[in-house]
Amino acid sequence: MLKGKKIVLGVCGGIAAYKAVELLRLYIKAGAEVFVVMTRHAQEFVTPLTFQTLSGNPVHTDLFNLYQEKEIGHISLADRADLFVLAPATANVIGKLACGIADDLLTTTVMATKAPVLVVPAMNVNMWENSIYRENEERLRRHGYQIMEPATGYLACGWEGKGKLPDPSAIFAASEALLVPKDLAGEVILVTAGPTCEPLDPVRYMSNNSSGKMGYAIAKAAQQRGARVFLVSGPVALEPPSGVEYYPVKRAQEMLATVERLWEPTTVLIKAAAVADYRPREVAEGKIKKGEGESLMLELVKNPDILAQLGAKKGNRLLVGFAAETDDLLANARKKLTAKNLDLIVANDIAQPGAGFDVDTNIVRLLTPDGDVEALPLLAKSEVATILLDRIASLLCTRRGSVE
Ligand code: PMT
């Protein structure tokens, strides 16, 4: 997302300035070109040389430096930015911006830019709660600045509370989100992810190897593209992406009940979850004891097919299923596409290395009811998510166009 983008990183004078170095490294690793602007106070905490060495670009510090102004004036810095990030942003700089004061290079450049501005405050908790500061933040928000919530914890000043700079990876994710086109705004996308766990007794269950990575990548990308996202997830070790509405579930029946509860406002359903087709008929009240015999019989009963049930009452919604197959990939996927009344099915050939369960990549084919098959190469699950959402966006566009 950030590859080739020009980011101006404004660093203000606070102890968290050292974390801006890590943020800069993340941007560079993602292929962005970064221009750092530092306030005078920021240079008391970290030297410009550190940022200059890591960014490969001169660091800008002084509004009235004839050399810097000749090389790249503050207006051209403001013009060239695809994104402006202020991290850490102090109460002082936020206060100046809220009042339209441009008395140094950083504030002047921010005020001259037309790029989206992400402000990441970091300060003492009492300053953050101060009513004047709160009004300043609110004013910036009203003027279209994106403000991140600080993290809570032990602060360098000795206090505990809100005011820490969020983790650089969270600032990175927020930066990406600002640059994504919001082509799914207005959609309500329900994504299911992960495995279901069907209990045998209080300590044992039947499940599968789904890590949730595919579904979570879709949920994150959909949220960044402006959709309201419900993420209904079986038990996985992943953090839900920020900004999604998260519904943890365990059993298939619970997943069905949750999806039905969220069904009314949903416009697109994407079922990446690996739902157990069967569950034990009985769940033992106590732990099943090892018996004398060499085997143990378990009776299984069919779980509801969530996607098929919803396919039968889909209305105007767009339904996308997944098919995890070890053989006859296309024939099996086609059967599911028709039987479940889907608009698109993502067939993953889980017999291939790098595809399917519990890996960071996938190899998929996208099938539509008119017989189209799009084969994608081995891609990161985040890239599969982007392409899948591109196809969904264009299906929605065609559908909306034909209704109007
Ligand atoms: O989670 P990861 O480790 O990233 O792995 C990703 C994945 C391999 C789990 C994912 O890419 C995938 O293929 N998910 C669907 C797996 C699956 O259950 O496929 P299926 O062919 O059994 O089911 C077909 C479709 O019906 C799926 O959309 C499934 O969610 C749905 N289904 C299945 C059974 C059932 N009882 N209810 C359902 O809704």
Image: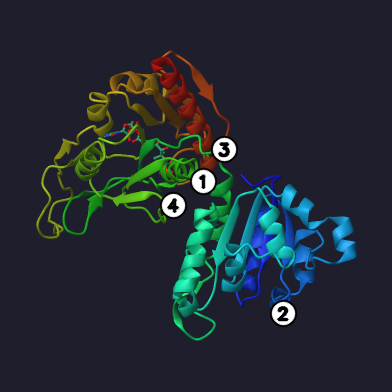
Ranked by sequence position, the earlier of labels 1 and 3 is 1
82 displayed left or right of 224: right
> Label for residue 44?
2
Q: Is mark 3 within 8 Å of ligand 1?
A: no
| Position in image of residue 37 (x %, y %) | 73, 63
| Residue at left offset 56%, top offset 59% | 171
Helix, strand or loop at label 2? It is helix
* Amino acid type at mark 2: Glu
Query: Quick check: marks 3 and 2 in contact, CB under 8 Å?
Result: no
Residue 147 visible within the image: no
Residue 95, picture quadrant: bottom right
The N terminus: image quadrant = top right
Ranked by sequence position, the earlier of labels 4 and 3 is 4
Ranked by sequence position, the earlier of labels 2 and 1 is 2
| Residue at left offset 21%, top offset 45% | 254
* Amino acid type at mark 1: Asp
